[in-house]
Amino acid sequence: MVKTLRLFFTLSIVSVFALCASKAWSANFERQWVHVSETSAVIYWQLAEISMSAFSFVEYGTGRELGQRTRQASKPRWAQYHCLTGLSTGKKYYYRMVNLDPETGQRTESGLLSLTPHKTPGAVYLPSDAAGPPYILDKPGTHYVLTEDITAAGTAFEIRADSITLDLDGHEVVFGNDTAEQVYGVRFGYGEGCKLVNGRIVQGARSNLYSAAVASLDRPQATEVCAISTDVHLKCAYPFNFTHASKVQIHHNNIYSRVTELESRHYPGNMLMRFYVYSGDVNIHDNILTEGCHWGIMVREKNRRVMRNVQVHHNDIQHHQQYVNGYALAPGSGADVHHNKVTSTGRAVHITGEGTMFHDNYIDIRGHMHLSDYPARTRPFRHRLIELHGVKFEGRNTRNSKVYNNFVRITQPLPTDSDGMGSPLNKVDNGVYVRAEADRLTVDRLVDNDAGWEIDRWRFYWVKFSAEYPPVKITGNDSTSLFADFPAGVQPGQYTIYMKWQYVPPTPLNVACYDPNGMNEVYNNHFVGITYYKNTRHGDYGDSGQWATGLMFIHMNEGPAEPGKYSVYIHDNQFESNDLFINSDMAVDMDVRMENNTFKLLAEPLQTERENRIRAVGATFESKVRQAGNTFDGSN
């Protein structure tokens, strides 16, 4: 199990006074952080162990008896984020944090704490003190406070001067409600030392591709964003989009995206948080990220330079990879990535640069059929069943990177069919993407005049159109019609578009280090690959079959290293699988050092039948592995 390091940072901008009598409760309420505005507050904490998850809420009130509570989190998470709104300025509030065990319902509560909403001297209030939207914030050194929910047809706020703080004070900002332009909830323009805090930014009904809730484009000035929650949903939209980023602090945000469509999965794809880093000094920590359709946090260096002082840590990520080659984390060269929890439906981490440190993270994922526009921007999408990676090394530029002290588990379940039941908010589990009302239903098409779909977006998905009939497979669609073989005489009503999930083979450690002298290192990790298929099948790329392995090699045929060097050194790890220990797509003829690793054959949930748990690596490399101090427990 992961060795969990506890790092305590003084992150709160207000004093929080604990009134508890003992230290026992604090083990479940770590990394506490509070932001307090004039009439609202955000309260954040994490559970003691990174492997844990819980439901949560906050009880609060002006007396010690409390009497009010926030809405309970909809899903159990490691990190907890709650907003208190409608508070009275200057009045003291007491509160306690509450965790609920998702299996037993057992309640664990913090001690009683307090906070006091406060005014900021000299603040400028919006919308009363400025015209907009868009509200142009151009007075240097000004603290702006939003006093009510607002809706903007286009961009809501633009920051254009130094040392500006925009405090949304717990209010909701709707941007892009009716425009053909690319627009933003908050856009940082010119301005050094600017800050955005405490509010909810929601994408409205109509805006152009690549609109974003929060954007900082082509500016390397110091920027901080915290206590912001997002909800974006239109094609290619970003919650966060930062380019030429430098001196950036992004922390304690609750990032959510319902985006299901992108222009191309090749470039730029779609991300929950997108950072193109100009030089360095970037700290992305203690954020909760949910859904999306492709990548979670992407950090890319400009011109392949090694970034300095870039950290990605203590984030709770549940992204949903709906398109090929998305990952929860793509950290970039020189980044230090640690203490993140990834429980996504999709690939976990993509290491493609130089000097990346990936350590003390917890990964527990599964993945299903994905869409691929191959080649770029071709339609219709292809449906691909491609291996699922936990930690993926890839490319000739991957050098001097280290992966250590991580727990990585991937599971391949059996196929599931929800019969179109459940909410689109839970598509990760039930596959449901759309639930709406049909205007017309004939034997060859279902028509929804409000749909506006991309052509053939739903090809080979399924549509449930009546409780009396089974779902049918969609053969194609235009902007308003789904084409399929429907029975005659059925009246139009509610319909559901969903996918029958098929899951893909797990490769918790996937190595494609094409530089023979890369000098990458993997040690002290725990990798687990599990399949629920008793009978395995190995297919081609795009239909890779039913199997599991602890370690996978891809195209490791670039030849030997220089004397004393290696492509990757894999040592002192624990690998567990109920199927394969080591797998490859071809014979390995590179200098891969594998020493003192333990391979354990699992009996649960079942054990596949294999004559050899090492497959397709070539006789020479297999012999080398078996003679290098590696232990094979429970199998030949």
Image (cartoon, grey):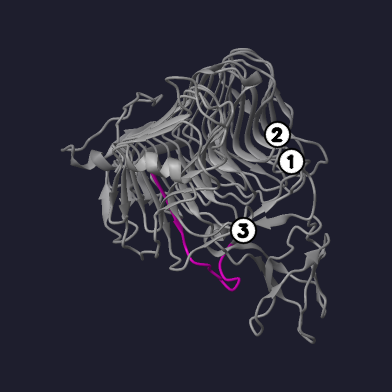
* Residue 540 x, y percent position in the rendering: 62, 56
Badge number at residue 543: 3
Answer whether residue 115 is magenta in the image: no
The reply to whether discs 2 and 1 touch (Cβ–Cβ < 8 Å) is yes
Residue, x 46% and y 31% (percent of image)? 591
Q: Up-down: is 379 above or below 400?
A: below
Q: 338 and 66: which one is in front?
A: 338
Residue 380 image-quadrant placement: bottom right
Badge number at residue 617: none
Q: Amino acid at mark 1?
A: Gly
Q: Amino acid at mark 2?
A: Tyr
* Residue 333 x, y percent position in the rendering: 54, 24
Give how far apart the Cα atoms at labels 3 and 1 are. Answer: 39 Å
Give the number of the mark in front: 3 or 1. 3
Q: 387 and 23: which one is in front?
A: 387
Q: Amino acid at mark 3?
A: Asp
For the record, the magenta segment spans: 407-423
The C terminus lies in quadrant: bottom left
